Image (tube, rainbow, N blue to C red):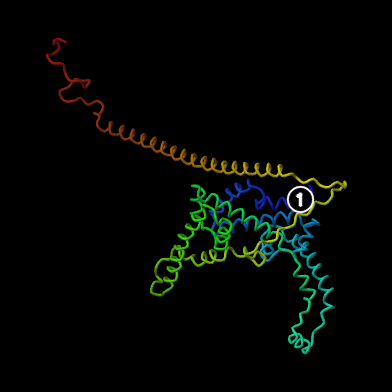
Amino acid sequence: MSRLRELAQDVRMIFRTRHASSKFIAYFQLLDAFKEAGCPVCTRLERGALKALDGLMYEQVNDPFTRDRLVESHGFCSWHAWMLPSVRNSASGVAIIYRHLLQETLDHLHAVSAGVPPRGRWHRVWERIVGSRKDPLPLLAWRKKKSRCYLCAFARRSEQDDLRTILEFIGEAEFGEAFTRSAGLCLPHLCAATAIGRDHANLQTLLAIHVRRWRDLVWELEEFARKFDYRYADEVKGRESSSWHRALDVLVGRAGVFGPEREDGPVNQAPEVAAPASAEGRPAQAPGAEDLVEIQSLRFENEKLLRRKGELLAQQAEDHRARLALEFQVLKLTSDLKAMAVELAAASRGKSVPAGATPRGGGSDGQPPIQGGEHAQI
């Protein structure tokens, strides 16, 4: 399999957007994202982009197809480009890729710089009068021909898959309760979910959850503003202290997620380029649809097993804590029994008659005398 197909499959696997079975993988991953702060779809997009960039920096820096694709898009968009410093050991890869991109830019700049003579004042006035329109400058025309960011197309497919998963399972008990406890969707993603699921039966449930949550957020913002008044400055501040930050996240989404190359319209998806021929001259064989479905099914089963493993480990830890608590109770009871035995022994010795003493009216062995003298009948 060529590196072209490997990269395309890696990115598709990361964002989980190809087959219906990937929605079930997204189901479990969204459950984890619900526990994080902010919009869970934004969280998934951010994590998927970091993972994709990490794989690209590790394996695809010198790949010819990857290099050509980045040349077409003039590198990554601002959001994805500034994620690169967060990727471990990415400095050398960034230097290699962007040196090549900068050299391509310089080549175009040298080619067009000689053909941009300055216009005189009367020339500019005459163009305004007659309304003549010149062709765009070569540098600007070259810039307009660039394609969209390579990862933004996959991000768009990923968020659509996540939003469909939320609409599909928001009525389920476990998924719905987890979503209700989460921060919910940001407004851009809620609008996208409305557009995708306009006639979906669970759309009203999704909207009702956000109406209640955002009504509470409005109250928190009012409370936060009120406590800024000097008359109430001494009052204890609670959850409303972070309301202003959460309001930003609600209205505009995670920083960078809706950058200039995402926009509201559809993102042009990366073209499916045929794999180059192998070293033997034969075309590389791409996996069939059945193979991909099987891979996704195995990944789904693996995800379930991992989650089950986590549940069992948590149960094991809970059982271990319970066993330790029981052992502590047994030791405590044993210690209490020993203490009671010591106290009883001490009390018994305190009430006994000293050795050698004969009780009054009794025999030498301490027993009561036999009535009737030594001839008494038994």
Q: Residue at x 28, y 33 (%)?
A: 347
Name the residue nearer the viewer: 249 or 242.
249
Q: Residue at x 79, y 56 (%)?
A: 65
Q: Can you identify the residue that label 1 sits on?
A: 5
**Quadrant of the rendered structure where residue 296 is?**
top right
Q: Mark 1: which secondary structure?
A: helix
Name the residue nearer the viewer: 339 or 4.
4
Q: Is residue 340 left or right of residue 158?
A: left
Q: Quadrant of the C terminus?
A: top left
User: Residue 313, percent across and down?
Assistant: 55, 41
101 is higher (above) or lower (below) than 371: below
Name the residue nearer the viewer: 71 or 269.
269
Name the residue nearer the viewer: 262 or 167.
167
127 is higher (above) or lower (below) than 174: below
User: Residue 174, percent across and down?
Assistant: 50, 47
User: Residue 148, percent across and down?
Assistant: 71, 63
**Quadrant of the rendered structure where residue 95 is?**
bottom right
Q: How many marks?
A: 1
The residue lying furthest to the right in this view is 281
Q: Residue at x 68, y 41 (%)?
A: 294
Q: Is residue 150 left or right of residue 107?
A: left
Q: Residue at x 34, y 34 (%)?
A: 342
The residue lying furthest to the bottom in this view is 122
User: Residue 258, percent across and down?
Assistant: 62, 64
Q: Dot 1 surroundings within 10 Å: few (below 14), some, or many (20 or more)?
A: many
Amino acid bearing label 1 = Arg
